Amino acid sequence: MIRNGLAIAALAATMALAGCGKKTPDVLPPAPAEDGQTQTGEDPNAGNVSGVPLPGSRGDFLQNVPSDSVYFETESFSLDGQDRATLDSQIAWLQRYPNVRVTIEGHADERGTREYNLALGDRRANAAKNYLAGRGIPTSRMTVVSWGKERPVALGSDESAWSQNRRAVSVVPQ
């Protein structure tokens, strides 16, 4: 009986101490960035009275190239003429701003395994990177990441959604 009482008392003390371990932080981390905002939630063009994106910014990139994305056929990582034209406009912009780095994200549609789509996304991102590098953009300015099917731009299980998700995206930081 005493043994059971001691065990219960020890268990109660352990549970009481376990609740004391975590405190709410004084400062919360910033909310996730939304389009057109930095990680701190500030507009990157704050103080820019004209409303025109700052030269060399992501806004400037998006305004001056026809698209930040190139699209692929099913299970393909080959660039077609339209893709090359889009990348050529990105090259022209990147040559104007030689200090700007770019991350090329590879994506796939929802079909296939996670591993297959990560590998396919990597091949798509590297196809875009290799094209940019072949036209004079130093590889030291480019980073490649594959998201596979994890970050779809279009939700749905039809060809319309899938075709929008088979892409490589050039991301210029804020």
Image: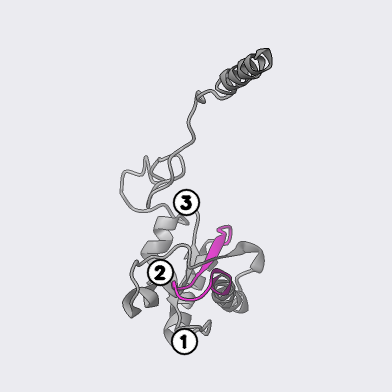
Inspect the image, locate mark 3, and give the three-letter code of the amino acid beneath it. Gln
The image's mark for residue 65 is: 2
Q: Position of residue 168 (x, y in %)?
A: 49, 71
Look at label 2 and name its amino acid: Val
Percent coordinates x, y for residue 27 in the rendering: 49, 27
Query: Residue lying furthest right in this view?
Result: 3
User: What is the number of the mark on residue 143?
Assistant: none
User: Residue at 45% across / 87% down in the picture?
Assistant: 81
Q: Secondary structure at mark 3?
A: loop
- Sequence order check, earlier mark of 1 and 2: 2
- Is residue 87 rendered to the left or right of residue 7? left
Camera-side residue of 156 and 134: 156
Q: Nearer the viewer, mark 1 or mark 3?
A: 1
For this orientation, the residue located farthest to the front is: 1
For label 1, the residue is 80
Which residue is identified by label 3? 174
Q: Residues within 10 Å of mark 3 (few under 14, many from 20)?
A: some
Magenta stretch in the rendered image: 98-117
The figure's colour scheme reads: one colour
